Amino acid sequence: MAQQKIKMSPFLLGAITNSLGRLPCTPYDLTKVKKLIDFYPVNFWTDEIPDMVIEGAGNFSCIGKMPNLHTLIFSNSICTTFFINNFSFLADCQKVKILDMTNTNFSDCRLLLSMPCLHKVLLPTEEQLIHTEVLDTLVNHNVQVFLMDPQAHKAAADIRDIRDVENLLQLKKALYTAIKSILMDLYQNQEHYYYITLVSDGDAHTPCISAWSYEALARSASSEEEKALIKWSYADSPYCCHRQEEFAEVDRLLQERSDICTWKGVPFDIEYENRYMLMEEIMQQLDKEGLFAINQARKEVVVLVEVMPPEEENTLRAYRMNRKNLKIFRKWLEEAAEYSINIKYWNHGFGMQDDSFVLLKYLADKGKAAISVTELFSDLGLDKMQGDFKQTRDLLKKTNIKYAINIITDLAALLLECKINQTVNLNKLAWRNIKSAVSEICITATPEEHALINKTLMDFASEPSAYDLSEVYNKNYLQKFALLCKELRKELYNKR
């Protein structure tokens, strides 16, 4: 069955990608989007674009297909003014609590009356709006309403500061200059680097450069055990904060933007995202210029933008900044990354189907800290498949499951999480407001069950078209998912 194409603005596709941590693969992915705050555009000519999406300038209509969206802020680091063809999608934004349209061509305030959960709305200047009498109604219903003030009144000062175009452009230039200067100076020692990172803190203050070379590691540790302890530590590197004085202009420009520590809620989130996105963007630009291929081949170094103390967002950025098949990147993932299947596999093919909801709801409803695959197979009827999960729709007619292979692949991902972290946190993986009374659970399997799952993953990776899942997904998507299953199988069972 051919997948329906969705017209979408490059800005919206970028916002969805930033929200999910990956490109959307199916229309169902839209139901998982809860927050859109970073509308940095993708390039339909050079970036990888999902099969279901076609470019539609000014088309933001599929926002109306996001039933769990609660925050909608039209903003990005380059301070774009968004021209939206039709705002009727707002009528379907039934859960949106925070709405910021100061950077759009929005005008008809009557549309806001169809948003029952609205708590705070930020709008363009009053001269741009029509039917402003509606705003009094909103205020009477305890909605906070803010209008952009063309004469720069204090009420709008924080919002304007966040979107200060001139400051952002100066900051971008200063970051670029400082990072490039520091790295070029560092490379003069002719050492071979395997780790280069730009590090900041939880408030996105002035960053620093840190790096490890093989030569520096050999000088800093006398045993393999000592090397293992410090090899990915930015703070233990002799090059941590190398020529930090180069960031003086960056520090000055950040101070001009007022103290981020005093901000709360939406303004903090926007500023934090803007700063880290700028850092990532500049490191990627320097990568394109070949700066990380000096002294060593690019494939031999992992390049990062990290927040410290470390958070999972570091891993998300790392996937965007490095080719995932590089040996050095795989080594960093295994030895240092904040690992979770929520980052690597979940929502990247796994955990994305209606059947995923069935599995997670089953596990949540059990309310048990430990669940066996034997019990799960019996309760869901998978024990009747006799180990063959290729064509199962007829056998599953009396259940809520559509395709058994979805349950097997998702279960394999959960087993991998349990293998690495002993348990899996259901509340972090679940959606549609599924909440488990016992959030951390351990899934166990017998050797025979592991052998069955291993064989199924191998069969699916080899011939995905033999499974009934091929009825709903095109060949390109199936091949990508099959490759992911192959990767997961290798990690779970140490099989090639």
Image (tube, rainbow, N blue to C red):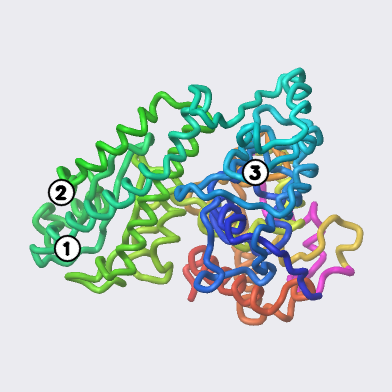
Check residue 315 for magenta coloring: no
Q: Amino acid at mark 3?
A: Lys
Q: Nearer the viewer, mark 3 or mark 1?
A: 3
Residue 242, horizontal then vertical, whole percent: 15, 48
Q: In the rendered image, which residue does mark 1 sit on?
A: 214
Q: Position of residue 180 (x, y in %)?
A: 22, 58
Q: Secondary structure at mark 1?
A: helix
Bounds of the magenta span? Answer: 369-394
Q: Is residue 50 left or right of residue 494?
A: right
Number of residues whose C-alpha sits closer than 10 Å to that of mark 2, classed few (under 14), some (14–19) or many (20 or more)? some
Give the secondary structure at mark 2.
loop
Q: Say which quarter of the image contains residue 475.
A: bottom right
Figure quadrant of the N terminus:
bottom right
Q: Which residue is mark 2?
A: 242
Q: Which mark is residue 456?
A: none
Residue 141, image quadrant: top right
Q: Amino acid at mark 2?
A: His
Of residues 138 and 18, which is closer to you in this image?
A: 138
Q: Judging from the image, what secondary structure is the residue with disc 3 in? A: loop
